[in-house]
Amino acid sequence: MGVLKAGLCPGLTLDMVQLLRTHGIKTVVDLVSADLEEVAQKCGLSYKAAALQRIQVVRAFDIFQMLHVLQDLRGTGSQQVISSGTLKMVLVDSVTAVVSPLLGVQQGEGLAFMMQLARELKTVARDLGVAVVVTNHVTRDRDSGKLKPALGRSWSFVPSTRILLDMQEGAGTSGSQRVACLTKSPRRPTGIRELVDIGIWGTPEQSPVLEGDQT
């Protein structure tokens, strides 16, 4: 999680990422915790380092820590960040990791905590006016065999927009290529598909247009 990739911020090219890696900086955490003045001198970074420095990484290993982080984000301590306009997005990676351990024996209690987390995420988006992006795992339906979001039907109503990232199969395809498919949206028709390369973090040049752009 948080591996440096080209295109992560404006001007962060593949050459720049490779240069950072030669100095032991391989993840976003490595960069934001480094002495950026020293990094800038060694690697010729300027505003690029400043942009990545604005990424704050908070580790939460269970749903209780996650709720505490979100509630603290909405607290008075974050108002300076909000007023300066530096907070643009909140990314949760991944929601399955903190919710699924609760969906075992005490499933009813686990569902209650899951919906509490869902309400908190929506409140953060509304109150702070930021985008909230949540990654989720997928499972296969036992009857149809089709991919479906993990955490069950209750969670499927939580995201307003859903994008499925799937492997790109076929001869001549790269192992880093994925197909991003819009499966739920309040504004766009579902079924829109785009081929992306997570190795270069962008749309591959000269790639053919995927068939069945809309369904």
Image (cartoon, rainbow, N blue to C red):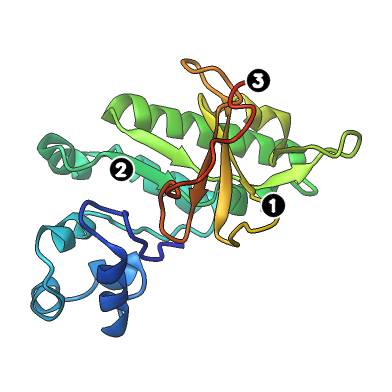
Side of 172 relative to 148 (left or right): left
Residue 25 falls in image quadrant = bottom left
Question: Residue 74 appears at what percent x and percent y?
Answer: 30, 37
Which mark's residue is nearer the viewer, 3 or 2? 3
Query: Label 1 belongs to which residue?
Result: 169
Count residues near mark 1 (Cα–Cα under 10 Å), then give few for <14, some for 14-19, many for 20+: few
Side of 97 relative to 141 (left or right): left
Circle 3/circle 2 CB separation < 8 Å: no
Q: Nearer the viewer, residue 181 or 133?
A: 181
Query: Label 3 belongs to which residue?
Result: 215
Please name the residue shown 80% across and 37% down the image: 146
Q: Nearer the viewer, residue 186 or 108?
A: 186
Side of 12 relative to 203 (left or right): left
Query: Label 2 belongs to which residue?
Result: 73
User: Considering only vertical position in the picture, is 24 above or below 184?
Assistant: below
Which amino acid type is marked by label 1? Answer: Glu
User: Considering only vertical position in the picture, is 12 above or below 92?
Assistant: below
Question: Residue 200 appears at what percent x and percent y?
Answer: 41, 59
Which amino acid type is marked by label 2? Answer: Leu
